Image: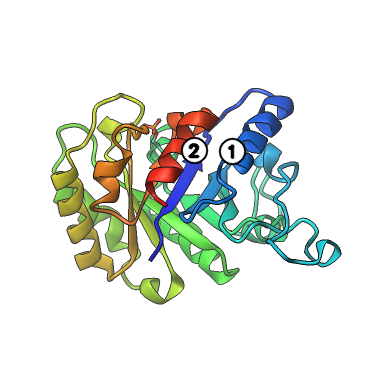
Amino acid sequence: MNKIIIGNWKMNPASQKEALELFDAIKAGVKDAKAEVVICPPFIYVSSLKFPAPRGARLAQFHGRQYSRLKLGAQNVFWENKGAFTGEISPAMLKSSNVKYVIVGHSERRKYFGETNEDVAKKLQAVLEVGMTPILCVGENEGENREEVLREQLAGVSGFRLQASGLIVAYEPVWAIGTGKNCRPEDVKKAMETIKNLVGDVRVLYGGSVKADNAQEYLEVVDGLLVGGASLNAEEFIKIVEKGS
Ligand code: 13P
């Protein structure tokens, strides 16, 4: 199966103009990529990023749709589809905005917004119910036991029919996110085996200080990458995509 390279822009860039420039540069650079490429912008930019039509498609028919290998993702979601939940965005809204993938349970959501494993399980279920693909983030903090943490974080979701749903699990050790500290590929491999033992033969990605010059070693052990900081630099991100092609 082809590799999947996901850019998580987090709360960046600072303006619509910069978001469009970054997106256009990435779009041009990955148009012949064999890897599947997913961009997860902040919600406010979701509707302004224009994904071109699949090659050979009639433009009118495919207006607003995406290149088959370049897809739109979201960084978060709420678990209800409508109602009085000020400030939240629903799975139905994302689906109707052409979003195909949704990051669920990112460590920054767990740390700064108090998301629990129960919240994450509800979000996961809601995303699956509307037919989008969840990217479930798991990973230990510095000093924690990796196996134990993965077991705890995945306990609430092991009852779902995950394999059939196309679920993606991203192993992101918290201590490796944005720090420049890299997890050894052999440890990523062990984490991947633990994840597959717990939830079945799902696709597993690695995330945490991935750059163009270390992407290859991770791609040898996992199905793809979840890239934060380096996805904000079009040139660097395109180089990472090329490694996965
Ligand atoms: P960095 O690539 O900036 O370390 O971030 C990883 C991440 O959290 C992606 O979701």
Q: Which residue is mark 1?
A: 26
Task: Please state which of residues 115 and 20 is positioned toward the viewer in this rendering.
Answer: 20
Residue 232 x %, y %: 52, 29
**Residue 48 vs residue 8: left or right?**
right
Q: Residues within 10 Å of mark 2 (few under 14, many from 20)?
A: many
* Above or below for 124 versus 228: below
Q: Are marks 2 and 1 in contact (CB under 8 Å)?
A: yes
Residue at position x 51%, y 27% from top? 233
> How far separated are the C-alphas under marks 2 and 1?
7 Å
Q: Position of residue 241 (x, y in %)?
A: 45, 44
Q: For mark 2, what is the residue?
A: 238
Q: Report the side of 113 relative to 156 (left or right).
A: right
| Dot 2 amino acid type | Ile
Q: Position of residue 213 (x, y in %)?
A: 31, 32
List the single residue furthest toward the right: 60
On the question of residue 176 being in view, the answer is yes
- Kindly identify the residue that appears in the image at 59 percent across and 38 percent down: 26
> Front-most of 46 and 104?
46
Which residue is painted at 62% across and 31% down in the image?
Answer: 22
Of labels 2 and 1, earlier in sequence is 1
Judge whether residue 113 can be spotted in this image. Answer: no
Residue 239 picture quarter: top left
Which quarter of the rendered image does ligand 1 occupy?
Answer: top left
Label 2, secondary structure: give it: helix
Q: Amino acid at mark 1?
A: Ile
Residue 173 in the image: above or below residue 196: above
Q: How many marks?
A: 2
Q: Is mark 1 within 8 Å of ligand 1?
A: no
